[in-house]
Image: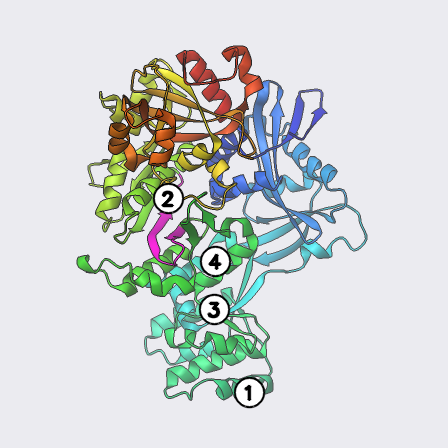
Amino acid sequence: MQGSRIESSQNVIEIRTVSVGDKLLDAIVQLWRLHSDTLGFLPKGAFEQAAQEQTLLAAIEPRDQFRGYVLFRRSRGGIKIAHLCVGSDVARQGVARKLVDEITARHPGASGVGLWCREDYEANKIWPRLGFSPRQRRRGRGRSGGELILWFKDHAHPDLLTPLSRDDRVEAVIDSCVYFDIVDIDQTTRGEESRALMSDWLEDSIRLFVSQEIRNDMHGDGDVGRRERRERQIGNFEETRIAPAAHQQALDKLTGILPAAGDDQTKTDYRHLAWTLAGNFPYFLTRDRPLLTHKDALQKLGVCVLTPGEFIRRVDELDRKEAYRPEEISGTKITFLSVDDGLMPSIEKLADSGDGESPRNLVDQVRNLLAKPRENLVRVARDSDGNLLALIGISAAATTSPALVLARMPKSSVAPTLARFIAHKLTAEQAKANLVTYRITDTRLPDVFREALLYGGFKPDDKGELTRPCRGGLLTLADAQRELGGLSVNRVSRESETWPAKLTDVPEPAYMIPINPAYASSLFDHGLASQTLFCEKPDVLMQDECVYYSGTRMGFPEPGRIIWYVSQGGGYEGTSAARACSFLIEAERGPAKVIYKKYRRFGVFGWKEVLAIAGKPEGELTALRFSHSESFTNPIPLAAMLPDLGSAPAGPRPLDYSLFLKLYRQGMGL
């Protein structure tokens, strides 16, 4: 882990590069949440991405006391700071300066370090003390109309101001409909997509214009009060200023490729487009469906016609490219994809017509979620034939209580498995933030998904919504009961309620079981599965419950805990290590043909593999049914375990529960 130590008369501060899986990520997210009112919304995935790109630094005092962090990005030869935050208990102790100085030390060739800050923030008093000076002002696009200030710390290279001070925002012209969505008092749900253009996080990314034609649209409004309100608001936007001759030339081009304008509204739309084309603006934003049908023809003229939501996603994609790489379920043929306009016809088919949902309403709901990509996440699951298997919409606008607001899942052979996989992932991701209550607010939740959530520990609250506290790490039973609510007496049910947290003061049977890497990759290990092209049963890796067969005669009191030791072989990397843990539901020993018939639906083992273990159809073996698997973020190599184990695992062996907890802490980086 990279880092530098900076000594002062008061303390010793280590500036450390935060890496993926670092336990500091949780502390950073917690500090951000305390100051999110000024720092703004940022999904946890953005912090993890910064860690991956080594653009997240933490300030640490002796005994690993976390004091603050800086999140930045490289931009056109310079550095832009997105977040700089220190704990209130170390304010004015030089921590912020050390973080900024570390960026300068690590990037001496950069033109400088810059950041945008709202004029009304107290932080503007700090920047001069850290070596920054104001270089540029511009009016924010929010309702307050406050100014943004560009603060710049010069690295004293020739021509150093240009890369960060020039206005490199993406420019777009909005039509009247989008403008009215933004400024009207009586705001409708349909206008949410347009109003998302005013989000604070976009102020540094986009520059919105209105054309002269918008004044003509307002002039014809017979509602005097509404017209006057709209006219007063126009000063918050820049206007296209194009010579009339250039506008006419652009209009002539448009009429040559578009259908004849048969009504006044279409003529107005064409004039809006002409101002956009004449001014060489790359984007025109509208919700007008007839106009959107001509986007391909208009693209040939150099104008990209998009809905506001599609434009926001494109801007966000440029800013956060890594977040838009399709996430393939490792080792399977099912892929999770981000949503764009090209998928809308397929999404329409997922509408719950039996409950009165129209395809248009479903698409509008999806567009409204997509319009705020920093607050919402929308994904579809698609098989190798292009069929949509699921649609998921998650809102994290309330960071302490994220919600699944949209779920559609058509009937398919993998629907139950996929539903449990998604429920499992929802819980696991939120548990990283510790004690976040997850809510299910979709009123049209498919039955197969509701069943998966109930199995995963979700419970109805007094409003009828399914909720679940998501807690990771290690807890005492008393803490679990206090933080997670009443727990079931039944051990298997309690695992669903507490997972992925582990209880420290309720000893359980525990085992270390060696497993072939090929089987591990198919049963639970996504890291190993990503080293293969595909598995024979695409839905098995997504299963929450699986089975493993062993020829050992050792008894397995259950339920209990398993730590999986992945043995060496098969050309896989990262073997000869403990790589995961699971919850043992049951163990049953009997004749191979009987055991296989009972458990074959749970695993990737075929009869050929089972017969090889048992030796003959009547030969006895043990089936271990397990669930709630969790891959270690820090696989533990054999050499690190030998002092406790004494030798490499040649077969299943029992573990003392204290050793299980020790290995779990080490594997999860706790």
The reply to whether residue 189 is visible in this rendering is no
At x 62%, y 22%, the residue is 61
Where does label 1 land, which residue? 248
Which segment is the magenta one? 378-399
Colour pattern:
rainbow
- The location of residue 55, given as percent across then percent down, is 62, 40
Q: Amino acid at mark 4?
A: Arg
Please state which of the two labelled residues, at mark 2 or mark 3, is closer to the viewer: 2
Where does label 4 land, which residue? 313
The reply to whether residue 205 is visible in this rendering is yes
Instruction: State yes or no: discs 4 and 1 in contact (Cβ < 8 Å).
Output: no
Q: Amino acid at mark 2?
A: Lys
* Res. 537 mark: 2
Q: Secondary structure at mark 3?
A: helix
In which image quadrant can residue 176 be found? bottom left
Question: Which is nearer the N-term, disc 1 or disc 2?
Answer: 1
- The location of residue 1, given as percent across then percent down, is 64, 29
| Other-residue count near label 4 (Cα within 10 Å), few / some / many at <14 / 14–19 / ≥20 | many
| Other-residue count near label 3 (Cα within 10 Å), few / some / many at <14 / 14–19 / ≥20 | some
Question: Which is nearer the N-term, disc 3 or disc 1?
Answer: 3
390 drawn magenta: yes
In which image quadrant can residue 6 be found? top right
Please state which of the two labelled residues, at mark 4 or mark 2, is closer to the viewer: 2
